[in-house]
Image (cartoon, helix red, strand yellow):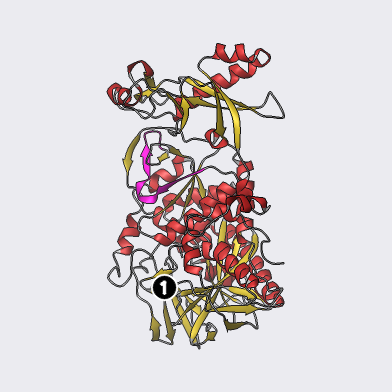
Amino acid sequence: MQRLTIAPRPNWKLKAHEYGFNFHTLLGEPYWREDAYYSFSLAQIENDIEAPTLELHQMCLHAVAQVVNNEQRLQQFCIPPAHWDLIADSWRRQDPSLYSRLDLAYTGQGPAKLLENNADTPTSLYETGFWQWLWLEDQLQAGLLPAGADQYNLLQEKLIERFRQLKSQFPDRLLHLSCCQDSSEDRGTVQYLADCALEAGVANEFVFIEDIGLSKRGTFTDLNNGEIRWLFKLYPWEFMLREAFAEHIYPSKTQWLEPPWKALVSNKAILPLLWQLFPNHPNLLPAYFENDPKAEFTGRYVKKPIFAREGANISIWQGDQPILASDGPYGAEGYIVQSYTPLPEFNGRHALVGSWLVNDEACGLSIREDSSAITQNLSAYLPHVITP
Amino acid sequence: MKRSQIINLNRMRKYSGVFALKPLALCMTVLFAGCESNEQQADIFKTLEECKTTYPDLSAQCEMAFNESLKKAEDTAPKYKTMDDCIIDFGPERCTPYKSADGNSWFMPAMAGFMLARALDDNRRYNTAPMFTSSINSSPYYNRWTTVDGNSYGDYRNRQVRTNTDVFRPQPRITKTIERGGFGSKASAASSWGSSTKSSSRSGWGG
């Protein structure tokens, strides 16, 4: 694993406009950077990222099965009791899922360590599935990358394939896609999924989360009063289950992407549970609930809220001394603690690996770098290459 | 190879004006599945009888398509609170009261015809969609064939049209919304935190 510099494509901003990638620069800071890329060997990708990703995903599914019918666990996962049936039923029915991103600490050697599983609302999807792919093709053509350079990236292809499977499962169903207002990144992510769905022949419509309505029949509706029967929501389950329409979720009989059981996978409480179920697994870090007497670390450890987004409210500790902390609005539901493992540093930047799954298939990689040891939502995205 | 060999760039392109595109050249490369035409020939019949007369061999198909379209019209046509609202768009003789199974009363344009597109390889397979028209000359649908999503299919007197298969895509069932805004409050509460340091244009709810 290396960080190598490369000349950016001279026309990339025009191209970004052409393809509708309009969140590459944020607050004047580059979010997408192509003046450098990360390079991996094929063995690193296949042995250290892909294989553990598949295994970690199966371990997470195993963990979910331990939670759905266990009241004590559901409480630890901070699922409101009114929604236990929603989640248990969705698991029993095996409601289909779409995608996930595992965040891994990986230095290029030794086992990658699972930091968390973004299984409910992963973003940086477009940048990964399409935009870095296009970068690779362009740079290969320009001769700036070694011939035969590859990328670990079947993400878009697998998404389209997944939508095809879902279409055969629900042949005449219209898909609604939704995200919050005022986020160009989320809107771009959802537009990308709409494009992938359309490529697979899945007809779809868009509605903002805030615009969703409720009909007399108890179904959710779009702004044209059209019924929503199948909804992709780039909006966390832990929010939805605590909002005004929460009680209507179950009776509405909506088919959800991601399905309700994903609320358990994306939950930080799965980290201590995984450690309990698979102690000393090479791809796991020791993790405990905050109040667990076993939560004693000799070295540094990280405190994470049960629910949090984009690196908010995370703190790094040594004993009872905080070393670094990010602020944010989360933490009301409690915390888990996880042994600290440093992210590799390149050029003074900390690199975080995102490993992508579509349903059960591992199929792509993304890299984010941040000047802080806590990767947050303004960290930069860089493309990667598998060097021949 | 660990990456996709082909991505349909046409599907991904949002603005074609940036570069001088040569659509013809693009279509010649097999990569661009978006160049495939999904247009097809279709008939629009004002009545079931008209369909049966045109295709005597397919009278059963005519009947099924007609009934299917009627059902689609009830579920998916625009619904209005008052007759007057409907008349503004479609005209007095084109509007009809409608009561849905769940007891909602409203007004909707009556189906003025139905589109029938037969599969090229098999006469018995078809797609169908309800068609509407307006008798009000200030309406965009005046004397034109229109579908539930408001797309125009030309002069109301035409019987044969070229259509895009999008017209047959699933449409949402139209219902009455009694309340809105029940989702999204947690996001706005959380985003009010730190709004001075972060642009709302990026702090989304993904992660």
Q: Secondary structure at mark 1?
A: loop
Q: Is residue A63 above or below residue A93?
A: below
Q: Quadrant of the N terminus of chain A?
A: bottom right
Residue A144 found in image quarter: bottom right
Q: Is residue B153 above or below residue A175?
A: above
Residue B2: x %, y % from top left: 69, 67
Q: Is residue B83 above or below residue B168?
A: above
User: Is residue A161 in view from this perspective?
Assistant: yes
| Residue toward you, A178 or B61 | B61
Which residue position holds label 1?
A378
Say left or right for B18 vs A108: left
Residue A74 forms part of the magenta stretch:
no
Q: Specify the segment rendered in magenta.
A: A204-218
Residue A41: x %, y % from top left: 69, 78
| Residue toward you, B24 or A347 | B24
User: Is residue A79 in view from this perspective?
Assistant: no
Task: Please give the name of the residue rendered at 60% of the width and 66% of the height, measured from the top-left corner.
Answer: A133
Residue B58 found in image quarter: top right
Q: Chain of mark 1?
A: A
| Residue toward you, B9 or A258 | B9
Say left or right for B185 vs A122: left
Residue A84: x %, y % from top left: 47, 51
Q: Residues within 10 Å of mark 1 (few under 14, many from 20)?
A: some
Q: Quadrant of the C terminus of chain A?
A: bottom right
Residue A347: x %, y % from top left: 51, 87
Residue B133 found in image quarter: top left
Task: Please give the name of the residue rendered at 50% of the width and 23% of the height, measured from the top-left corner.
Answer: B71
Q: Is residue B196 above or below residue A208?
A: below
Q: Amino acid at mark 1?
A: Leu
| Residue toward you, A44 or B110 | B110
Residue A209 forms part of the magenta stretch:
yes
